[in-house]
Image: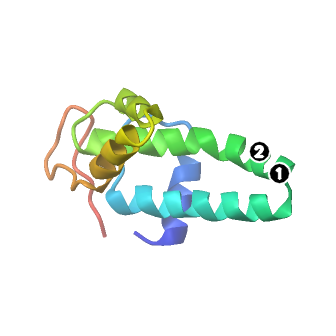
Amino acid sequence: MTFLKSVEICFFKYADFNGRASRSEFWWFYLFNLLCYIVGFLINPVVEIIIILGLALPYFAVAARRLHDIGKTGWLQLIGFIPLIGWIIMIIWCATEGHKKKNSYGPAIKLK
């Protein structure tokens, strides 16, 4: 999946917490968030806060779908609020390869 396709899908599924997301979809959108935060920081702190609030919901949605791909509930992303340990666990989970067959969250992702 390309960078632009990932961003497009994540904004199209802005608040869709159902289904699954591939590793590339999650990590490209994470990079997009990071770049937007940096640009917002360089412009003005108020702009940065607006960007953070605007991108929070699609980020949580894609993170929930990413966890669904590895067979975990999206609520487990709350573990990321635990300093250091939670972040490490979330990085490991988001970098884990997803299930190749259907799980309780939907059919396997078909990458082109």
- Residue 61 locus on image (x, y percent): 49, 39
Question: What residue sits right under mark 1 in the picture?
Answer: 45
Residue 75 is left or right of residue 72, and the answer is right
In x, y percent, where is residue 25?
Answer: 42, 59
Identify which residue is drawn at 27% across, 45% down: 69
Q: Amino acid at mark 1?
A: Pro
- Say the numbered circle drawn on residue 49: 2
Say which amino acid is labelled 2: Ile
The quarter in which the C terminus is drawn is bottom left
Q: Residue at x 51, y 58 (%)?
A: 29
* Residue 43 place in picture, x, y as percent: 84, 62
Q: Residue at x 69, y 46 (%)?
A: 52
**On-image quarter of the N terminus:** bottom left
Outermost residue on the front side: it is 84
Distance from label 2 to label 1 (Cα)? 6 Å
Q: Nearer the viewer, residue 59 or 6?
A: 59
12 to 71, vertically: above or below: below
Residue nearest the observer in this picture, 99 or 49: 49
